[in-house]
Amino acid sequence: MRLITDILYWISTGLLIPVIVLLVIGFVWAVLVLGGLYGSHMARRRLQRVMAEIEEQLETKPVREVDYSAIGRFHPALREAIAKIEKLGWKPVHADKVLADFEMAGDAGLRPSRILMRLGPTLGLMGTLIPMGPALVGLAAGDIVSMAANMQVAFATTVVGVFGGGVGYLTLQIKKRWFVQDINSLRYVIELNENESS
C-alpha cells in the first residue's frame, strides 16, 4: 500500500511543472482572446450600421437586387455565405445547406472560448492541489519556508486558472450573442427571398 501511495505522490508532483506551463500558455491565450474580442467588437459595431442599411434596402427592394458587398469588410464569413447563396440561384435547398454550414462554422469559432472556460479552472485546481501535499509535509516537518513556497504556488495557479476560465466564459457569451445575430440576419435574407419567390 505504501508503494502505491508513493507512486501516486510522485505522479502528482511530477505533473506540477506541466500544469504550470499549461497555465502560463493559457494565460497568454486568454490575453490574446481578450484582445481579439476587442477587435471583433469594433468590427461588429461597424457591421451593425451596414446591416441596418441593408435592412432598409430590403424593405423597398427585392432581395436579389440588394448589394451585400459592404458586409465583407467587417464579416467575410457572412458575406461569403450570402455570395454562395447568390451563386446557387437562391434555391431554398441550397440556401438551407449554406445556412447549416454557416452554423457549423460559427459553432467551431466558439470552441476556443469553450476550451479556455473548461480547461482554465481544471488546471487551476490541479495547480492548487498538487503543491498542497508538499506543503502539508513541510508543515508536519516544521519547515515553514517550504510550506509557504508551496502555498504561494497553489494560490497563484488558482488565480491564473480562474482568470482563464472567466475570460473563456465572458468571450463565449459575447460570441454566442453575435453568432445568433448572424444566423438571424442570414435566415432573414433567405426567408425573405423565399416569400418573394412564392
Image (cartoon, rainbow, N blue to C red):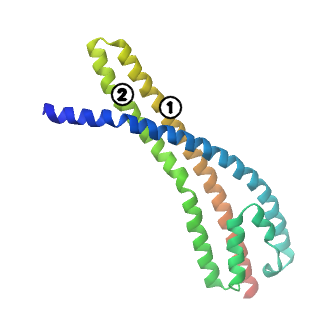
Residue at left offset 40%, top offset 33%: 127
Residue at left offset 49%, top offset 50%: 115
- Residue 10: mark in rendering: none
Residue 172 in the image: above or below residue 109:
above
Residue 46 position within the rendered picture, expressed as x and y whole percent measured from the top left:
80, 56
* Label 1 – label 2 distance at C-alpha: 14 Å
> Helix, strand, or loop for circle 1?
helix
- Residue 131: mark in rendering: 2
Name the amino acid type tagged 1.
Answer: Val
Question: Who is closer to the viewer here, 74 or 190?
Answer: 74
Q: Is residue 4 left or right of residue 179?
A: left
Q: Tag 2 or tag 1, which sits nearer the N-term?
A: 2
Residue at left offset 38%, top offset 14%: 145
Residue 136 in the image: above or below residue 175:
above
Residue at left offset 61%, top offset 69%: 102
Name the amino acid type tagged 2.
Answer: Pro
Residue 94 image-quadrant placement: bottom right
What residue did someone put label 1 on?
A: 159
Residue 73 in the image: above or below residue 155:
below
> Helix, strand, or loop for circle 2?
helix
Residue 92 position within the rendered picture, expressed as x and y whole percent measured from the top left:
65, 84
